Amino acid sequence: MLKTCYSSRYYAITHTRSMEKLTAVAEVLAAEHIAELVDPGLIDINILKKLHNPAYVDAFVQGQKPLACMQGFKNWSPQLRDAILSVQAGQIVASEIALKDGISANIAQGFHHAVYEYGGSYCTFNGLALIAQHYPDKKIFILDCDQHGGNGTAEFSAKMENLFNFTIFGHRFGCMSHERSITHHIDQNTGNFEQYIAAIDAGFAQALEWQADLIIYQAGMDCHKADRFGSRWIDATIMFERDKYVFEQAKKLNLPLMFVLAGGYQPLQTLVPLHVNTFIAANEVYFPEHQQPKAQL
């Protein structure tokens, strides 16, 4: 069964419900025996101070506004703080599992818009760059399939030689291109699945050329047509086939992969099944003998 990092500490009430969805997804995974949940504990804030401006880290941990709310969550709370610190710990633990087992997940979102100085767009700390910091001798390749370009990760990858940002998006969101940040825009109205698959193929080709040690897959669901940021040609079936194709390519190429939920802004009752489908797709590829429910398409 797929090993997945999660703790009840991941839960926090926010005006976007984007932290609440983590627990909603975890509850389905546990009830349907889709994943084995692993508690990662809390991250040492000194680790985050090596990644981000220490003044920003201290402000968030202590709840000092405005920096504590720079990521966009309107009300700071100890619950939110502990949720973020636990999710960041999950990034490290899940990566360790993936390097050992070939596949893992962290029930997490909110990383790729955070830059060194502060967070942004519901991303407090950059948990993608965090993995590259944790493994300085390994090459960490980000395959970012969120609807928004990973501008924060692009900035970090310009400074961290062992971090590569490859992002496929409908909204550029200020994401810059450079030697270790390749961007693929697919139009929200005129794009199609063939273009998306071609971009994923280009990503894996780049990962192989760069000799990546670990793929971090951002399985964003804000691409879905019912999302306020979505592309009108992307439905649940395409989302599932996208995820399954990524897992198939990683397994075929023997590239360890860890995935996270990334964005999604529909009501929880329609969003949660989309995220759960990603876990079902992973099990179908990596654990075909495992009995589990069928994807909701």
Image (cartoon, rainbow, N blue to C red):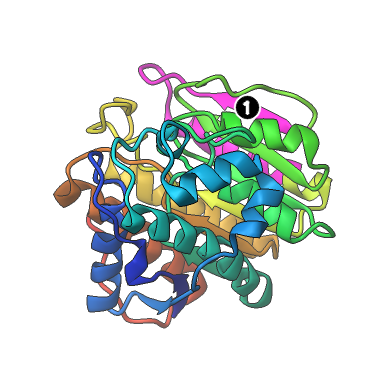
Residue 134 can be seen in this image:
yes
Front residue of 283/87: it is 87
- Residue at disc 1, secondary structure: strand
For disc 1, the neighbor class at 10 Å (few under 14, some 14 to 19, many from 20) is: many
Kind of residue at badge 1: Thr
Residue with the mark numbered 1: 183
Q: Residue at x 24, y 55 (%)?
A: 273
Where residue 7 sits: x, y (%)? 38, 71
Q: Quadrant of residue 72?
A: top left
Looking at the image, which residue is at 17% across and 43% down?
267
- Residue 83, picture quadrant: bottom left
What is the quadrant of residue 70 in the picture? top left
Look at the picture and state if 81 lies above or below 104: above
Residue 114 placed where, x, y %?
Answer: 55, 36
Give the magenta-colored segment's residue range. 180-206
| Quadrant including the N terminus | bottom left
